[in-house]
Amino acid sequence: MNMRTVRRPRRYIDGQWLSLLAPAFRYSRSRDAFVLRGIGRSLGPVLRADRRGAQRPFKGADRRRAGVARRSARVA
């Protein structure tokens, strides 16, 4: 078995395309992605559903800095 030090990059594709390609791909739980049937263990693309575009930016206070604001309010 060939041990790779660099993992194959994940390709993010739209969920509709993923459903169309489903007969040629299988889901790999260890990779949390879809790989080609038969040869996907070592060759071919590694696909994931693109959910990144579905996230909308949070409107309001910057959530990343909310913890800092709370801590500084307690100290003051």
Image (cartoon, rainbow, N blue to C red):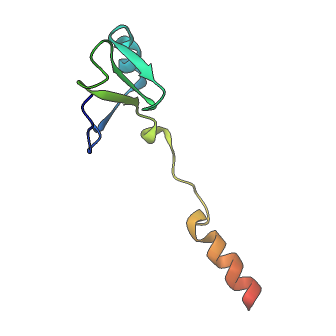
Residue 28: x, y in percent? 44, 24
Pick the quarter of the image with the C terminus: bottom right
| Label total for image | 0
Image-quadrant location for residue 35: top left
The residue located at (30%, 21%) in the rendering is 40
Residue sitting at x 38%, y 27%: 14
Q: Is residue 45 left or right of residue 72?
A: left
Q: 7 or 71: nearer the eye?
A: 7
Which residue is painted at 35% across and 19% down in the image?
Answer: 17
Instruction: Name, please, the residue furthest toward the bottom.
Output: 76
| Quarter of the N terminus within the rendering | top left
Q: Which residue is found at the position 26% from the left and 39% from the top?
A: 4
Q: Position of residue 75 (x, y in %)?
A: 73, 89
Query: Residue 32 location in percent, x, y?
Result: 46, 31
Q: Residue furthest top?
A: 23
Q: Is residue 64 left or right of residue 24?
A: right
> Residue 62 is drawn in which quadrant?
bottom right
**Is 64 on the left or on the right of 18, as rendered?**
right
5 w.r.t. 30: above or below = below
Q: Is residue 46 above or below residue 60?
A: above
Q: Residue furthest front?
A: 1
**Could you tell me residue 3's position as x and y percent?**
27, 36
Q: Tell me if 26 is positioned left or right of 1 in this view.
A: right
**In this view of the protein, which residue sits in the foreground, 33 or 69?**
33
| Quarter-of-image position of residue 53 | top left
2 or 68, nearer to the observer: 2
